[in-house]
């Protein structure tokens, strides 16, 4: 029941941000040469999309409340345009990244899987890292939350230790690959 309450709280929180038309969820996944991973999740709240300081505090607490409740450390930064809440995770290997508990208590992150199905299929084949799947609301586990919204966006940027031999979809910038453009709404 406690787990259900946390998930419900996360869903309601993100729903409120979406209804306000002021939210983003962007992940950067760094693949290290030793097969470990570092994931950085940034939740952005656009100041122009919130009515006043009270509404901004409420929007921030919707995200940080669930993180605090789950004991997940985060940082909060602010500039003239938005407030960003950042969560970082390190994973020893692909098995840990794709485990059921990898992002427990943290909402709206891509679901990495080692088998085909919902989420982002990530695996090592022939010594090469391969990713496939559709980066949409289902991949983030947020179909019901973002339904009908076209102002809430997200992205997955993958940074490799060296340039990819083969790459399709998204944009390439050096050894980084953006799987969904930052301005693209998740639908």
Image (cartoon, grey):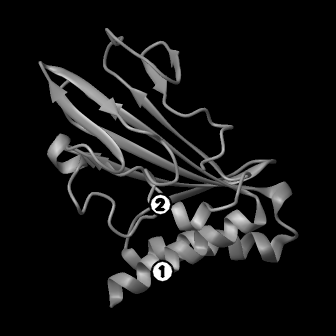
Give the number of marks: 2
At label 2, counting other C-alpha atoms closer than 10 Å, the crowd grade (few under 14, some 14-19, many 20 or more) is some
Foreground: disc 2 or disc 1 = 1
- Give the residue number, with chain letter if any, for mark 2: 74
Q: Badge 1 is on which residue?
A: 8
In the rendering, which numbered label is found on residue 179? Answer: none
Whether 2 is drawn above or below 23: the answer is below
Residue 168, located in which quarter of the rendered image? top left
Q: Quadrant of residue 148?
A: bottom right
Q: Position of residue 157 (x, y in %)?
A: 47, 33
Looking at the image, residue 152 sits to the left or right of residue 154; the answer is right
Q: Position of residue 35 (x, y in %)?
A: 18, 31
Which of marks 1 and 2 precedes in the sequence?
A: 1
Left or right, 181 with respect to 123, comes to right
Instruction: Work out which quarter of the rendered image holds the N terminus and state it.
Output: bottom left
Kindly identify the residue that appears in the image at 63 percent across and 36 percent down.
182
Q: Residue drawn at (68%, 66%), measured in percent from left and top?
A: 17
- For the residue carrying disc 1, how many other residues have a C-alpha within 10 Å: few (<14), some (14-19), or many (20+)? few
């Amino acid at each position: 029941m406690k787990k259900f309450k946390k998930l419900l709280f996360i869903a309601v929180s993100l729903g409120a941000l979406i209804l306000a038309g002021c939210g983003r969820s962007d992940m950067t996944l760094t693949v290290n040469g030793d097969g470990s991973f570092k994931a950085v999740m940034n939740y952005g709240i656009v100041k122009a999309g919130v009515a006043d300081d009270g509404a901004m505090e409420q929007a921030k607490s919707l995200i940080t409340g669930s993180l605090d409740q789950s004991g997940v450390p985060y940082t909060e930064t602010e500039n003239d345009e938005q407030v960003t809440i950042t969560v970082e995770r390190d994973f020893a290997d692909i098995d840990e990244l794709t485990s059921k508990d990898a992002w427990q208590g943290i909402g709206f992150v891509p679901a990495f899987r080692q088998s085909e199905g919902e989420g982002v299929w990530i695996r090592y084949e022939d010594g090469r890292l391969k990713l496939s799947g559709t980066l949409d609301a289902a991949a983030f586990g947020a179909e019901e939350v973002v339904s009908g919204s076209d102002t809430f966006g997200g992205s997955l940027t993958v940074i490799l230790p060296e340039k990819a031999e083969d790459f399709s979809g998204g944009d390439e910038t050096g050894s980084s690959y953006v799987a969904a453009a930052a301005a693209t709404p998740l639908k």
